Amino acid sequence: MASNTGKKAKHDDRISNLSDSILSQILSSLPIKDAVSTSILSTRWRYLYASMFNLDVDFHVFRRSPLHIITSFTNFMDKMLFIHTEGRIEQFRLDHVNISGMSDSHVCGWISAALWRGLKEIDLVFAPKSSIIPMLLFTSKTLVTLKLEFSFLMTVPVHVYLPSLKTLELKLIKFEDDGSVTRLLSSCPVLEDLSISGCDMQNMKCLKISNPTLKSLTLVFNCNLLEFQLFFFKLAIVIDLPSLVYLKYEGFRAKSYSVGNMPCLVRADINFSGKEIIYHRHGLVEFFEGLGNVKSLRLTINPKALPILSHKRFVALQNLLHLEILDRMNKWKGVGLFEFLEFLPNLQTLVTCKVSNEVWFPKDKVPACVVYQLQECKVLDFEDENSLFQMATYILKNATVLDKLTIYLEDQRQCPTLRGTFGINLGVEFQLILAFEIGYTRDNHPSPANGKFNEFWETKNLGPYQLGLLKDSSSNVKIVVSLGGDSVGKGKAFFAPKSKTFWVQNVVSSLTDITNRYDIHGIDIHYQHFRSSPEMFAKCIGQLVTILKQNETISFASISPYKEINSYYLALWRKFGDVIDYVNFQLDLCL
């Protein structure tokens, strides 16, 4: 009797016994091709697809499918959207390519049917030369999020109204004229987030962005076509956003700017590119004059731009508290830095990507923010030892309220005689980040050691002895070990754990030994290359930092991400942000 019961239990279909609402959630999380397949499992599953409330349709998976598969899928979509109309649909994502057997008009009908079902979020990616934008898309009363990506002309109807829309993303779209953008934005009375990226504006003379409720604006103009660049220099941009909190501008400089009425602006991420910036100085000053209320500014800019701003008279950024100056091309050498600081009387945090012997340190008139306001300064790179010492000495001597000076030292050859002190005794926490510990084997062909870290000192330049001298003579110096980095030997240094459990155990053991030997205070996570998923990276690093802090092996931890690897560090931040103390290279965090 017992064996019969066990046999019955073995073949019991527990999934099919779940409620319809739970099964609908399961189906809604599957790609559409997999969801279609469930209808043949049993009679219990035959019509469950009609209750799906999230649709993710990717035409790419059908590009090499035979005609009968495409026909079956088309029938499935028709039944779900045209026949079984009683259920709700909340999210609809469509990645479209031209496939024989699927007409544009048919796809347009699916989109309209989904909109009629009270759709809240829609994400549409269309193939070139398509024509499947239903006019109903511009009059939906329920849409909260609208994302459009296509490289053909978008015609905005005269009568357009989206009363619930809060997020609007437009990518690669060709605008019809100036009025089309104005019409679209004015029809969104509760819009909060707008992104315009890589769009074609050759039919426009002025891009006017005006909306009383918009809180976040992203403008990306980075098309590599020379024709686009030459046209863009003739475009005027007008921004009137009284509720704006965050502004991101990336790409080429326009002909002129009218940027104003942004009293709520907190954070701006500005990245001007292109050599033309040298020849269009007037517009550059115009743009920055409109950022007068910003509190945090990340500036990635052409090396010639900062000297231009520094020598032009414009309204000071009175409210700016945090400034990061970055240079992706690694050509800026700090020229114009302190001249620019004269326009920032209340600056409290400064992050600069580079200092060199070309930096001018004003002695007679030190910028007011350095003397009275600057609390934290970070130097991410320097040309040589002399420029480093000049920068550090200048800041430590003049910054009367400074709490922390951090210098990132990735290449020990930059500073071959690092020892002693600066001869200045201030209550400043000086963090020195060193990259001498690498999780690779020490042989002729280094390979990942699954968390077992080894020392890679370059003793001709900097070794344990010099480090000891620095520690003994400067009680305010804290040593930080950087984990990761760019390279080891002649190859790249990868984050490549074989086992999460063993990797964490090995690193904890290695770092505990290193910390005891050299009196290490913290670690900086600086991995740049990966052979794992963001989730694996987040779990390994998050558990590592948690254990090291619980064991009191370290007192703080920082991360050093940059744009191209944001996904890894965002995964870490979202799961273990409570154990991360500092971000050395600020992320676009949306938390």
Image (cartoon, grey):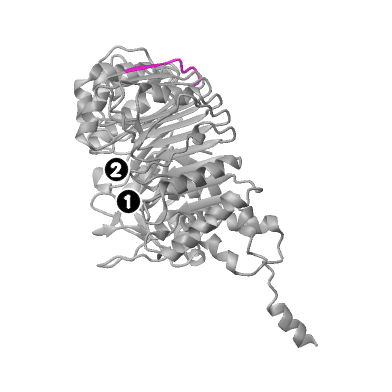
- Please determine whether, in this image, residue 352 is positioned above or below residue 129: above
Q: Percent position (x, y) of residue 92?
A: 53, 46
Q: Percent position (x, y) of residue 209?
A: 42, 22
Q: Percent position (x, y) of residue 215?
A: 51, 26
Looking at the rendering, in which quadrant would you find the C terminus? top right
Residue at horizontal 55 percent and vertical 60 percent from the top: 35
Q: Say which mark, if any, is on residue 456.
A: none
Q: Quadrant of residue 288?
A: top left
362 displayed left or right of 437: left
Q: Nearer the viewer, residue 463 or 53?
A: 53
Q: Nearer the viewer, residue 474 or 382?
A: 382
What is the three-letter code of the residue carrying label 1?
A: Tyr
Question: What segment is highlighted magenta in the picture?
Answer: 257-264
Earlier residue among tags 2 and 1: 2
- Please determine whether, in this image, residue 183 is positioned above or below residue 473: above
Q: Which residue is mark 2?
A: 418
Q: Quadrant of residue 376?
A: top left
- Disc 2 versus disc 1: distance between alpha carbons? 10 Å
Q: Say which mark, if any, is on residue 465.
A: 1
